[in-house]
Image (cartoon, rainbow, N blue to C red):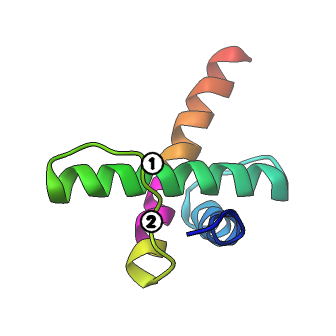
Amino acid sequence: MNLIAWALLGIVAGAIAKLLYPGRQGGGIISTMVLGIVGSFLGGSLFTLLTTGTISLAATGFNIGGLIVAVLGAMVAIFLWGLVTRSAA
């Protein structure tokens, strides 16, 4: 999957994750895209670990299953980002 497709998946996954995640999250489209891309890699890597037993840096595919994994990963990334910014304030 090329970088443009990862960016598009990141935007979509980040936007859906921000809609589903409870509470209010700050940030604009750039933070949504970054958290979505990080979530896509995080979700893809965890999914690979759970299904194959090996860890590798992998992004999810551009399909419904990949989008669901990317959204779940983005929600984890939003949670972790909230912990980091909350402790810094």
Determine whether 62 is above or below 7 in the image: below
Label at residue 85: none
The answer to which quarter of the image holds residue 77 is top right
| C-beta proximity under 8 Å, tags 1 and 2 | no
Where is residue 61? Give x, y as percent. Answer: 46, 73
Query: Which residue is found at the position 46% from the left and 54% from the top?
Result: 73
Q: Is residue 83 visible?
A: yes
Query: Which residue is found at the position 51% from the left and 58% from the top?
Result: 40
- Magenta range: 68-73
The quadrant of the image that shows the C terminus is top right
> Along the horizontal axis of the image, is 46 left or right of 9?
left
Callout 2 crowding tier (Cα within 10 Å): few <14, some 14–19, many ≥20? many
> Along the horizontal axis of the image, is 55 left or right of 76?
left
Query: Which residue is found at the position 70% from the left and 16% from the top?
Result: 88
Q: Earlier in the sequence, mark 1 or mark 2?
A: 1
- Label 1: element kind: helix
The answer to which quarter of the image holds residue 84 is top right
The quadrant of the image that shows the N terminus is bottom right
Residue 46 lies in magenta, yes or no? Answer: no
Where is residue 43? Give x, y as percent. Answer: 41, 55
Q: Distance between the residues labelled 1 and 2?
A: 9 Å
Q: What residue type is labelled 2?
A: Thr
Task: Using the image as rendered, state which of residue 9 and residue 25 is in the foreground.
Answer: 9
Residue matched to label 1 = 42
Task: Using the image as rendered, state which of residue 79 and residue 77 is in the foreground.
Answer: 77
Residue matched to label 2 = 60
